[in-house]
Amino acid sequence: MHRTSCSHSFGESNHHLQFTPKYRRPVFSDPEIMEEVKQLTQIKANQLGVLLIAQEFGPDHQHMFVARCKNYSDAKLANEFKGFVSRKIRQKLSHKLAKFKLGKSFWSDGYFFETVGSVTAEHRKFYIERCQKKHWVGTNYIKSKDQTQLTKFIAG
C-alpha cells in the first residue's frame, strides 16, 4: 500500500497512465530511447513528489503506475509527464528520433488513464494485459446484462 498521510487527510491515490508516441511509432524498440524515457519519467515523478511504482513499455507505448498523487488530476499528471519527457528526449536524442518521423511532437495528443487501488506486481500485470487486449484495436466494448464490475466488458 502507498497511503499518504498529511496533517488533515489520510488515503491512497494511485493512477495507471498510458502514453503513445506520435503516430504510434515503435520508438521504444530502441533501447536507448526507452531507457532515457524511463529515467526522465522518474526525474519528473521526483519533481512532482509522487511515487513512480512501475513503468512498462511496448514498442509503441508506455504504461506507468503512480502513487501518492492526491494533489494532481489525471490530466495534470499526463500534462506534466508528457511535456517534460517530450522536451527532454527531443533535446537529447533528436538524432535517434529523426528516423521515426514524429514531427515536432514526441507523444500523441491523447492518453489512457484509470484510478486504481493498491498496486502489486500481480495488479500491474492484470492492468497491462487487459489494456493490451483492447488497446486501440477498434473494438467496441459494451455492457453485458450480467456485468457487475466496470472492468467486465464484452467485445461488441
Image (tube, helix red, strand yellow):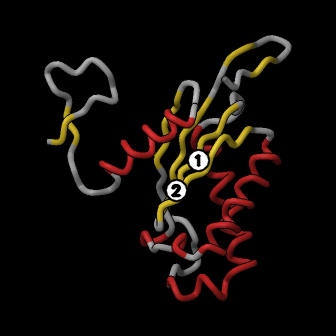
Q: Is residue 138 left or right of residue 101?
A: left
List the residue tagged with mark 2: 19
Q: Amino acid at mark 1?
A: Met
Q: Which image quarter is the N terminus in?
A: top right
Residue in the picture at 57% in, 31% down: 119
Residues at badges 2 and 1 in contact (C-beta under 8 Å)?
Answer: yes
Residue 20 placement (x, y as % from top left) = 49, 61
Left or right, residue 78 beside residue 43: left
Quadrant of residue 67 within the rendered picture: top right
Up-down: is 82 above or below 47?
A: below
Q: Amino acid at mark 2?
A: Phe
Describe residue 2's horizontal placement relative to residue 148 as left or right: right
Q: What residue does disc 1 label?
A: 64
Q: Residues within 10 Å of mark 1 (few under 14, many from 20)?
A: many
Report the Cα–Cα distance between label 2 and label 1. 9 Å
Observer-nearest of 6 and 128: 128
Q: Extreme top residue here?
A: 8
Percent of width and height locating residue 47:
82, 48
SS assignment at label 2: strand
